[in-house]
Image: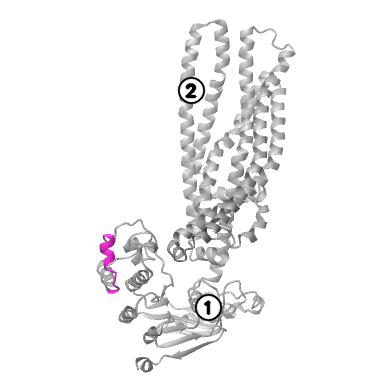
Amino acid sequence: MSSDGGHARLSSDSKYSFDIVFIKRFLRLFRLMFPRWLSVTSLLSFFLLLLSLLEQVIIFNIGVLPSKYYEILGEKDVDRFRSNTIMAVLLILVEAFMKSTILYVSSVLYVTWRSTLTVALHRRYFYDIIYYRLNVLDKAIDNPDQRITQDVDKLCNSFSLIIAPLIISPFTIGFYVNQAVKGTGYIGPVSVVVFFILATIINKFLMSPVVRSVFQQKRREGDFRFKHMQIRVNAESAAFYRSGVTEEKKANQKLHDLIKVQHKLIRRQYALNFSIKAADYLGSILSYIAIAVPIFAGSYDSLSAAELSALISKNAFVTIYLISCFTKLIDLSAKVTDMAGNAHRVGELFEVLGRLKDAQSEDYSFLEETMPSSDLVPLSDVNLDTDREFLEDAADTVSQTNTALRLQDVTYGPPKSSQILCRNLNFQLESGINILVTGDSGCGKSSLLRVINGLWSSITGHVAKGSKAVFYLPQRPYFTDGTLREQIIYPLRSDECVQYDDKMYQYLDLVGLKYLIDRIGGLDVAVDWNWYDELSPGEMQRLAFVRLYYHQPPFAALDESTSQIGVNLEEHLYRQCAELNITVMSVGHRESVRRFHDMELHLDGQGGWTMTPIRQDVINA
C-alpha cells in the first residue's frame, strides 16, 4: 500500500506509546500467541520456564566457585582444589548446554508465534475482499503488507528474547534478595531495590518517545520499500517515459523522510541508552558499598584473611547478580520499546481488519441490502425491514429465472465522495442477452462492475443476485505466482477441482498461446518469474480468456478485456463465448465489439443513462 494520506495520519502518532493502549493491544495478541493452556506455545513456555530456573541454579553454583577458590588456595588444599576444578568444568559444560537449549526453545517459540499471528492475519486479510477495502478504499493504516511480513516477525523475535528474563526475574530476584540479606543484612537488597525503582521511573519517561519514533520509522521504512517495489513492478512503463531523474528525486524524498525519522529515533535512544548504561555501571559498585558496611562495623573481624576473601567474593557475587537481575530488566527497555512499536502496528492492523470484517458482513453479505451513504441519504430515512423484504423478493424472482442479477434504482459513485456517476439505474442481466456498457472515460463504466461485484457499495438502490455466478475479467488481469495450470484454473486451487488438460491445451491453442507450453516446459513446471514481466498486455488478456473458457461460467463481465487484442482475434474470442453459452456484459470503447452484443447501456457521465437495442442489421451494413 502506498503512503497516500500518510501526512494526514502523521499527527496521530502521539497515541502510540508505552501506555494502556499498548497493554490492551498486546493482551489481544497474547491470547492469539497462547490460545490454550496445553497449546504448543504454552507447553514450550512452561518448558522454557523450567530450563531458565534450572539455569539459575547452575549459575549460582558457578558464581560461588571463586569464593571457594579463594578459601582453597588460601589454605593450599590440593584435594579440594582438584574436586572443585572438576565440578567447575562440569557446571560450565552444563551451563553451555542449558543456554543453547534455552536459545533453541526461544527460537522455536519465535517461529511458532510468527506463524500463528501471520495465519490469523491472513485469515482476516483475505476474508472475502477485505484486502481490497484495506488497500484501496479504507486506507486507515499505512503499509499493511509490511505489518504482515516484517512487523509481525520483529514483534515475535523481540518477545522471544525477553520472555525468558521476564518469566524468571521474580523467582531469581526473590532468591538473591534472600541470599543478600544473609550476607549484608537489609542494607544490600534495600539499596538495590531503591536504585532499580529510580532507574525504572526515569526509563519510563524516556521509553514512550522512543516507542512513537519506532512506530514512525516502521511506517517510513514501508513507504521507502513501497517506492522501490513500485519501480520494480512498473519498470517498463517508467522506462518509456525516461523518468529516471523524476523517480530518483521521489525515491530520495522517501529516503529523506526515513532518515529524518531515524535521526529523531537515534536522539531519543541516546537518552534512554545513557540511562541504561549509567544504571549498569552504577549498580556494579553497590555490591561493594553494601558489603563494606558490615566489614567496617567489625561484624567479620573474627574471620581469617582467606575466609574474609571468600565471604567478600560470595557476597559480591550475590549482590552483583541481584543488581544484574534488575539491570537486565532495565536493559530490556530498549527491546521492549521496539516490541511495543511493532505490537502497536500489528495490534492496530488486527483492529482495522476486525472493523472491516464487521462492515463486510453488513455491506456485502449475499443478498443483503447495501447500506446507503450517510452523507447523501440519512439512515433514519431508510426502512431496513422494507428494503430487506424487497431484496428477498427480488432475489427469489432472480433465482427462479435465467437472470444473473437485477439492479433496482441503483445510484452509485466513488466511495467517500459526493460525486454521482449514475442515478436510479435499472436493468437486469439475462441469459442470452449480451449487454455492452459504453460512455466516455470516467463516466462510471468500470465503477458499475465494481458495484455489481460488491467491491463498492451503492448509495441507494439494490443489486439482487441470482444463483448463477458472474465471472469477472478486470481491465488488468490478475496472475498469481505459480505454474501455468494455476493461472488457468485461478481462483481455484489444484486440490479444489477436477482438471482437464485437454481443455487447457485446446483453449491455449484457440487464443494463440500454445507456444507458452513449449516456452515454459509444461502446465506444471514451476516458474520463478513475474508473469506481468514475461507476458505482453495482449498475451495477458488472451490468457485471461483461457481462464474464462476453462471455467465456462453462464455469465461473464468483461472490462475492456480485448483492448490489447486485434480485431480478428477479438471476433474469434467473442464467438467462442457464444459457443460456450457464456452471456457477457462488456465494457468497451471499440466499435468492433458492438456486433457481439444485443443491448447498449450508455452512461453519459452526468448521472444519466439509456438502455437501447443494438441493431445488428445496421452494424452488418
Q: CA distance from mark 2 to mark 1?
A: 74 Å
User: Badge 1: few (under 14), some or many (20 or more) residues near its Cα, within 10 Å?
Assistant: few
Q: Indicate yes or no whether the magenta region holds residue 618.
A: no
What's the mark number on residue 92? Answer: 2
| Residue drawn where x is 43% and y is 84% of the image | 436
Say few, some or many: other residues with alpha carbon within 10 Å of mark 2 (under 14 / 14 to 19 / 20 or more).
some
Q: Horizontally, is 118 left or right of 516 in the view?
A: right
Asked which colour scheme the image uses, the reply is one colour
Provide the residue span drawn in magenta: 510-521
How far across and down, in percent of the image, does residue 589 sit?
44, 81
Amino acid at pointer 2:
Ile
Up-down: is 179 above or below 166? above
Q: Relative to 352, does residue 104 appear above or below in the rendering?
A: above
Rendered image quadrant of residue 250: bottom right
Q: Which residue position holds label 1?
A: 442
Locate the C terminus by quadrant: bottom left
The reply to whether discs 2 and 1 touch (Cβ–Cβ < 8 Å) is no
- Say what amino acid the circle numbered 1 marks: Gly
Q: Nearer the viewer, residue 478 or 57?
A: 478
